[in-house]
Image (cartoon, rainbow, N blue to C red):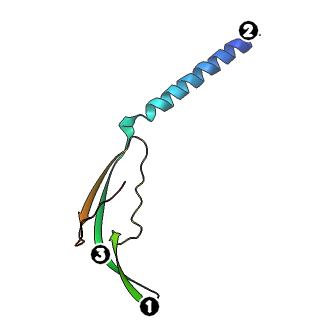
Amino acid sequence: MMGFVKNYFILLVACCLLVYTAAFLTSPADAARDHYRFVVRDTRFKRLCSSKKMLTVNKQFPGPTIYARKGDTIYVNVINKSKFNITIHW
């Protein structure tokens, strides 16, 4: 019975060390710094025999997706090449 308790204690200590190490390795020091460049412009689309102008981001509608995790730093440089003022909501 004493051997079982000793083995259980060693296993418990090993699990605690593993959890502590995993938490330390995923610290905010490993957080990513991503840079995005968004160019907003008027783009002409032709659908169903009619032409339409709309605002696009990097010639995409809807605009590109930003991927981030908690703790990441994201830099977005927005360039407005439209003749209208714009507002981007995050």
Q: Residue at x 58, y 19 (%)?
A: 13
Mark 1: which amino acid? Cys
Q: Is residue 68 above or below residue 80?
A: above
Q: Residue at x 24, y 66 (%)?
A: 85
Label 3 Cα neighbours within 10 Å, binned few <14 / some 14-19 / many ≥20: some
Q: Nearer the viewer, residue 24 or 60?
A: 60
> Mark 1 or mark 3, which is nearer the start of the sequence?
3
Label 2 Cα neighbours within 10 Å, binned few <14 / some 14-19 / many ≥20: few
The nearer-to-camera label among 3 and 2 is 3
Number of numbered discs? 3
Q: Residue at x 38, y 41 (%)?
A: 31
Q: Is residue 20 above or below residue 8?
A: below
Mark 2: which amino acid? Met
Q: Which residue is mark 3?
A: 42
Q: Quadrant of residue 53?
A: bottom left
> Mark 2 or mark 1, which is nearer the start of the sequence?
2
Q: Which mark is residue 2?
A: 2
Q: Which residue is mark 1?
A: 49
Residue most extreme to the top: 2
Q: Quadrant of residue 45?
A: bottom left
What is the C-alpha distance between the residues marked 3 and 2? 76 Å
What is the C-alpha distance between the residues marked 1 and 2? 83 Å
Mark 3: which amino acid? Asp
Q: Nearer the viewer, residue 83 or 5?
A: 83
